[in-house]
Image: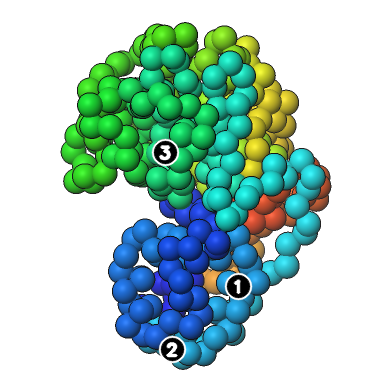
């Protein structure tokens, strides 16, 4: 495998659903990957589950990632000469970004929030399920957690899973839904159903119940209110609200304690993404499950992210007014228009990020990594939308 493809996989690993522990990888693969021969490495890299486990291990253990990148034999297996990789240092993670400790040998944490509603996390992905007295309602199935989901459920109940809810169609959150019974009721918004129906992924059962605006699910002692309020993050992404427990789940929008993932979490509709913060705050909730990172959220986290994004909007407007297009053109010339435009956009993003990061680096994790890309997305939205 080309070294740069490998590096790219590491960079995007957080978003594509890889967050399992090193210990779990070792338990399933007794030979340490650093000692693998080329045939073993090739086998692993062609097995999606093993590859995800190895990536997750490295995400949990940066020292091991560094050792792997510095191992000439390892890099030689990838078909390219070893090249020094330079990684910019990051500041320490704010206390506000840290979550509960994960038992990495176990690979997950499951905790009851209130009255039979549990949240489940591996430190990178998170979801929830409910016991009802008549069966379990499961929401999403991140591949990074995989069959550990079933183990987590079995820790707290012997009820079978009778209902499954898709938050949206992205595979990093629902990719192992087939671990649940085939005769369960699978529920999704009509946009999600349409996408899953046209998908070739056999690990994601087609929804058996579809709705367009609102749907109330009542099973045993539990009630969930599902609502669609527009293309937030992606068409079909729904609000999942437990009114008795005052828990709200909306995936890939708010990242408690952290900056959103790059480019506003890859939001397909930036105005809708920004407005989602106001829609969230219309709910009466004590706990928020955002689908990612380290901990549960609160309304205060939503307000904080809203403030962060407003700062970026203000700073990108100022950057657009102060960055001199023609001064940049004098440096790049006009012969290559893409070079000119790319340099200009980079300058706007950097100016915006430089104005934003100092005020937020001690308040949210990841702002040094992703603020410039948020600046770009918001500049483009202001220019186009």
- The dot on residue 76 is 2
Nearer to me, 370 or 181: 181
Of circles 3 and 2, the one toward us is 3
- Secondary element type, mark 3: helix
- Image depth: mark 3 or mark 1 in front: 3
Residue shown at 54% from the left, 22% from the top: 117
Q: Residue at x 57, y 9 (%)?
A: 244
- Tell me which label, 3 or 2, sits earlier in the chain: 2
Q: CA distance from mark 3 to mark 2?
A: 39 Å
- In percent of width and height, residue 246 lies at 60, 15
Between 263 and 114, the residue placed more toward the observer is 114
**Mark toward the start of the polypeptide (1 vs 2):** 1
Dot 1: few (<14), some (14–19), or many (≥20) neighbours within 10 Å?
some
Please tell me whether residue 95 is drawn above or below residue 228 in the rendered image.
below
Determine whether 7 is above or below 272 in the image: below
* Side (left or right) of 51 relative to 207: right
Residue 120 placement (x, y as % from top left): 54, 36
Which numbered dot is residue 64?
A: 1
């Amino acid at each position: 495998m080309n070294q740069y493809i490998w590096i790219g996989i590491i960079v995007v690993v957080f978003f594509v659903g890889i967050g399992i522990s090193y210990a779990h990888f070792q338990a399933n693969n007794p030979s340490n990957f650093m000692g693998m021969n080329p045939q073993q490495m090739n086998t692993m890299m062609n097995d999606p589950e093993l590859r995800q486990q190895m990536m997750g291990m490295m995400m949990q253990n940066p020292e091991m990632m560094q050792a792997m990148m510095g191992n000439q034999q390892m890099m030689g297996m990838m078909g390219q000469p070893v090249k020094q990789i330079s990684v910019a240092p990051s500041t320490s993670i704010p206390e506000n970004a840290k979550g509960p400790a994960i038992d990495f040998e176990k690979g997950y944490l499951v905790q009851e929030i209130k009255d039979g509603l549990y949240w489940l996390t591996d430190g990178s992905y998170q979801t929830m399920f409910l016991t009802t007295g008549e069966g379990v309602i499961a929401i999403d199935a991140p591949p990074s957690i995989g069959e550990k989901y079933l183990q987590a459920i079995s820790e707290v109940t012997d009820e079978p899973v009778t209902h499954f809810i898709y938050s949206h169609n992205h595979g990093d959150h629902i990719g192992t839904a087939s671990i649940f019974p085939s005769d369960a009721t699978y529920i999704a918004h009509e946009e999600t159903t349409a996408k899953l129906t046209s998908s070739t992924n056999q690990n994601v059962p087609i929804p058996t119940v579809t709705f367009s605006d609102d749907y109330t699910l009542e099973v045993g002692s539990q009630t969930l209110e599902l609502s669609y309020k527009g293309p937030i993050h992606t068409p079909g992404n729904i609000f999942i609200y437990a009114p008795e427990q005052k828990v709200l789940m909306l995936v890939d929008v708010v990242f408690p304690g952290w900056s959103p993932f790059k480019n506003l979490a890859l939001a397909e509709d930036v105005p809708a993404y920004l407005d989602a913060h106001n829609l969230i705050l219309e709910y009466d909730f004590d706990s928020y499950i955002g689908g990612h990172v380290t901990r549960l959220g609160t309304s205060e986290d939503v307000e904080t992210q809203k403030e962060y994004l407003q700062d970026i909007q203000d700073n990108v407007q100022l950057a657009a007014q102060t960055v001199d297009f023609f001064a940049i053109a004098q440096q790049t010339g006009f012969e290559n228009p893409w070079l000119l435009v790319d340099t200009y956009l980079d300058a706007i993003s950097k100016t915006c990020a430089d104005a934003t990061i100092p005020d937020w680096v001690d308040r949210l994790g990841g702002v040094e990594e992703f603020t410039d890309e948020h600046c770009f997305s918001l500049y483009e939205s202001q220019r186009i939308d």
